[in-house]
Amino acid sequence: MTTDTRAIEIGHDNKQGGLAVVEMEHVKKSFGNNHVLRDINLVVHKGESLVILGQSGTGKSVLIKCIVGLVDPDDGKLVILGQDVSELKSKELIELRKKIGFLFQSGALYDSMTVRENLEFPLRRQIRSTPKETIDSLVKEAMRNVGLAESIDMTPSELSGGMRKRLGLARTLILKPEIMLYDEPTTGLDPITSKEISSLILEVQKIYDTSSVIITHDIDCARRTANRIIVLKDGICAAEGSYADLAKSEDAWIRSFFE
Amino acid sequence: MKEKSSEHSEDQHHEAEIVTETFSEAAPDSIFNRFFLEVSSLATFTLRFFKEVFKPPYEFNELISQSFLIGYKSVSLVGITAFIMGLVLTIQSRPTLAKFGAESWLPAMVAVSIIREIGPAITALIFAGKVGSGIGAELASMNVTEQIDAMQVSGTNPFKFLVVTRVLAATLMLPLLVVLADAFGLFGSFVGVNVHGHVSTYLFFSQVFQSLQFQDLFPAVVKTFFFGFAVGIIGSYKGYNSSEGTEGVGKAANSAVVFASLMIFIIDMVAVQITSLFQS
Ligand SMILES: Nc1ncnc2c1ncn2[C@@H]1O[C@H](COP(=O)(O)OP(=O)(O)OP(=O)(O)O)[C@@H](O)[C@H]1O
Ligand SMILES: [Mg+2]
């Protein structure tokens, strides 16, 4: 693999021909003089799971926040599920956002609510007239899928780190998103729990038929979940390829991620 | 892509950027600059409030639960403080009035000071300390832990859900609390009058109500809405735009109280000017 942005286009052509759910072209984002994203080009295909690697502070979180619309890119083209984001009105943008799930680095659980209320919150707000039984059964299903069925009446502060990640995931999945964005899903967890979260991500992918973008520093998680890996450096995609490709890259810097 | 500038994180970053820029230029008047920057971004925030408050969907449930949290939970604090205030004010005023042989004016004098000024002002300051800091800290910690972003991602307008409801609840609840404080204050005063000698309930309250006029009540009630609004909007502004990190939470709570208290005095001063215009 070359350390060149052209690699993306090569990768794009090679791909199994799946539909693109996210396309970024020449996306740029700066905060004052801090040019975080310089020129990002990437494609996420339907049903694939794309892992993004990169050093701390290279803008991985900013990149996926651009996808979900928490950060506005300064420049470039962003197409999500076939819709050019810059052409959407704010109503349509909100609709589009509902199809994207975002697992926050910190979990972002609502502290003032119980586990159950955390799960009900997105449901109640999206479909205001949802009958109680439907909500209940959706909440139960989501809790079962992430293996948290017993903790439903606890508050987030009573949960362990791994449980918080699971709850965050359940809250996101309850809206059945088409695209899942994971911001460091396994950071701060022990190896066994990390492994569980990684397999949960794969399961989710299967059950809900989502496409995923996963940011991680955890190379084991990357190996388990990635169909394809992109390495971010200095605001551009420095390399792209399968786990096996990148692990034996000629570039020592890239190889160092896999050691 | 630039039109959708109503994004939460965007706003925040613009403000942060402006502030750091002024800092780096390090002009001697940087405190002055910062003050005006702060005022202008607070004004923008307030404008946004008025834009969002009339737009459906309305968050009635959240408004009611916030009103409960903000109003009902302050009742005992406000009631006790107001009672003590009325009691102390009465006991301390008695010697002065006695010197002029005007002891019988005690109920009337205390009632006018409580209703006109002390009730609204003290209650508003307590409200700023309790509710303003509470809103500031709560929103700031939600901001730090990305809960506000999470709401936005799940299709909820966090400004509407968090800010609009809290500001409305504060605006509506403070006047009620002031009425309650007035009542407890007068009761405290009644007890204070009865510490020396005996004045019947009927005599006390008929003196009180004779001394009060519409010009006393109306402006006193109207200004409390502004006090409540100031506490709500400043608390929300400080919390919603707090800096990153846990340290930002404390700062937001602290500066919310300071700024809101200052604002209460400014509004009070303006209110006095306006009322005296109409009374002369
Ligand atoms: N809202 C913001 N305002 C100003 N600067 C920001 C903002 N968000 C991110 N940055 C800056 O962008 C850069 C990249 O941040 P980002 O959080 O994307 O890093 P990251 O790659 O996710 O790192 P980590 O692995 O530590 O999470 C950092 O230098 C950060 O200071
Ligand atoms: Mg990050």
Image (cartoon, coloured by chain):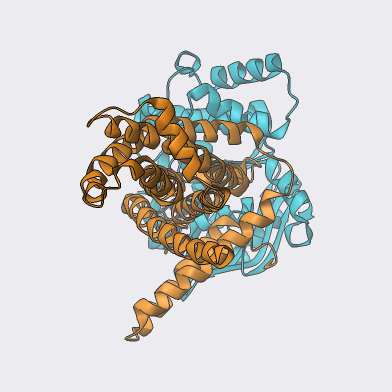
Compared across the picture, whether A247 is left or right of A100 comes to left
| Residue A146 picture location, percent across and down | 52, 23
Q: Quadrant of the C terminus of chain B?
A: bottom right
- Seen from the viewer's position, the closer of residues B59 and A27 is B59
Which quarter of the picture shows residue A132? top right
Which one of the lettered chains is coloured cyan?
A
Which quarter of the picture shows residue B200? top left
Compared across the picture, whether B247 is left or right of A194 comes to left
State whether residue A214 appears in this view.
no
Does A198 appear above or below A64? above
Does B230 appear above or below B155? below
Does A35 appear above or below B267? below
State whether residue B63 appears in this view.
yes
| Residue A110 picture location, percent across and down | 48, 35
- Seen from the viewer's position, the closer of residues B25 and B1 is B25
Compared across the picture, whether A94 is left or right of A238 comes to right
Q: Quadrant of the N terminus of chain B?
A: bottom right
| Residue B23 picture location, percent across and down | 36, 78
User: Residue sitting at 37 percent across and 31 percent down?
Assistant: B187
| Residue B237 picture location, percent across and down | 49, 56
Compared across the picture, whether A30 is left or right of B55 comes to left
| Chain B color in figure | orange
User: Residue sitting at 46 percent across and 13 percent down?
Assistant: A150
Q: Quadrant of ligand 1?
A: bottom left
User: Residue sitting at 48 percent across and 19 percent down?
Assistant: A148
